[in-house]
Amino acid sequence: MPVILVTNSVECEVGANEPWPEDVKLFQPFETEQILLPDNASCLSVQAFLRMCNLKYEIVYKKNAENMSPSGRVPFIKCGAFIISELEPLTSFVGNKGISLTGDLDNVQKADMRAYMSLIITVLANAENYLTWVDRDTYNQVTKVRYGSVHPWPLNWLLTRQKRHMILKRLNALGWLDKTIEQVYDEVDSCCTALSERLDDNKYFFGDKPTELDAMVFAHVFTILTTPLPSNQFATTIRCYPKIIEHCQRIEKEFFSGQNSNKI
């Protein structure tokens, strides 16, 4: 059976009439010894979204999941003849099957949701990459050890160096490479302020039902709070926002009960 890479709306529409298979596989790096903070957040975002949609999947751990992914990023989903990488293409793919977490939202709310998702990518994801690949203590004590742990020498050294070069180039293009760590935490603080104000006293960001925004916020917050790092300032910054913490705990309890051994 030929494999179809889902990258745009055309491929999404091709698989629209097919039901969700029972044997969907989600490919990601090993959690215990390999995966890094940014990739862990991305993988958990997709898992949370699928659970909120009540769609079955099986996690497959591969040391070369990043290289297997058509986009070069994790996670990616094998759904019948289709391969879908990352959260946004997956929501479109699932949506074309008539499964959506945003069916009750109007166009203004959907635009609002996308704006906050963009904020998370712009701030939290970049901050995670900065901390992982730029911050010297984290890079030396965590990143180098974990990223190359599943490969023999000198491949582990070469792959880590190659990945770091790619991330630094991206951060530089986005204006993040020259930031100080204090400026990064200030960006995170501002992002959390905006998210907390939007959440307010609601159960989820848009009422009583979760959306992909809730999945994304949960994944980044949970990962930041539960990932051991040389400095706990990242987690400390987020813990200053009790509404965001409660939101994270709520989703963990409702959709991941008994699954995650880490505690917030």
Image: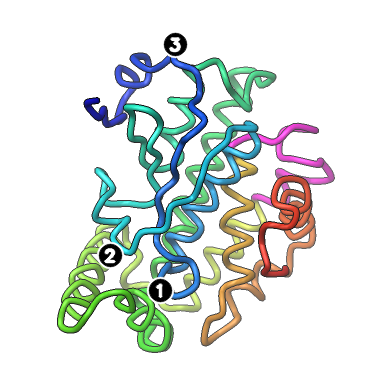
Seen as rendered, the residue at the extreme top is 17
Which residue is outermost to the right?
201
From the image, which quarter does the C terminus lie in? bottom right
Among numbered discs 2 and 1, the one appearing first in the sequence: 1
Dividing the picture into quadrants, the one containing residue 28 is bottom left
Q: Are marks 3 and 1 in contact (CB under 8 Å)?
A: no
List x then y, in percent, for residue 38.
44, 62
Amino acid type assigned to the residue bearing label 2 in the image:
Ile
Instruction: Residue 33: give x, y in percent of width and height.
Output: 44, 75
Query: What amino acid is labelled 3 in the image?
Result: Asn
Under circle 1, the secondary element is helix
Which residue shows up at 69% across the image and 19% down it? Answer: 104
Residue 81, given in percent of the width and then of the height, sits at: 32, 27
Q: Amino acid at mark 1?
A: Thr
Please state which of residues 60 and 165 is positioned toward the viewer in this rendering.
Answer: 60
Q: Is residue 13 above or below residue 250?
A: above
Magenta span: 195-212
- Quick one: 253 or 23, which is closer to the camera? 23
Q: Are marks 2 and 1 in contact (CB under 8 Å)?
A: yes
Query: Which residue has dot 1 on it?
Result: 132
263, above or below 229, in the image = above
Q: Which residue is mark 2?
A: 167
